[in-house]
Image: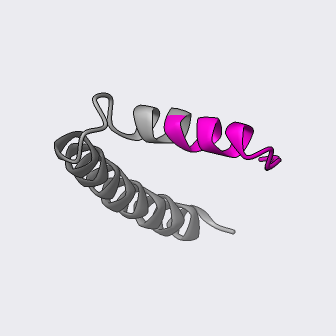
Amino acid sequence: MDNKGLLKKVAKLESQLDIFETEFETLNKILIKCGFPNGIVTLKETANQLLKENQITFDI
């Protein structure tokens, strides 16, 4: 791949990252408003605790 192709790919990846970061921030704010004090972090902890209590294994 030449420089032009690489620059195009980098630009696409930067755009995708911007979209991802915006969605992540929006989701985090929504979760905080829904009662998860630390947003996504708290949601993850809660989900893991529920899985543990119900003896459900889920490997990431």
Image: 56 above or below 48: below
The percent position of residue 38, horizontal first and vertical second, equals 32, 29
The scheme the figure's colours follow is one colour
Near-viewer residue (7 or 17):
17
Q: Quadrant of residue 14?
A: bottom left
Residue at 63% x, 67% y is 2
Image: 54 above or below 10: above
- Asked if residue 3 lies left or right of residue 53, the reply is left
Residue at 16% x, 44% y is 33
Near-viewer residue (2 or 56):
56
Q: Indicate whether residue 42 is drawn in magenta.
A: no
- Asked if residue 53 lies left or right of residue 14, the reply is right
Q: Indicate whether residue 58 is drawn in magenta.
A: yes
Near-viewer residue (13 or 32):
32
Image: 38 above or below 32: above
Q: Residue furthest top?
A: 38
Q: How many marks?
A: 0
Q: Quadrant of residue 29?
A: top left
Residue at 72% x, 37% y is 52
Near-viewer residue (3 or 16):
16
In which quadrant of the rendered image does the N terminus lie?
bottom right
Q: Which residues are magenta?
A: 46-60
Image: 12 above or below 10: below
- Asked if residue 60 lies left or right of residue 41, the reply is right
The percent position of residue 3, horizontal first and vertical second, equals 56, 61
The percent position of residue 30, horizontal first and vertical second, equals 22, 51
Residue at 56% x, 70% y is 5
Q: Quadrant of residue 15?
A: bottom left
The percent position of residue 43, horizontal first and vertical second, equals 44, 41
Q: Residue furthest front?
A: 54
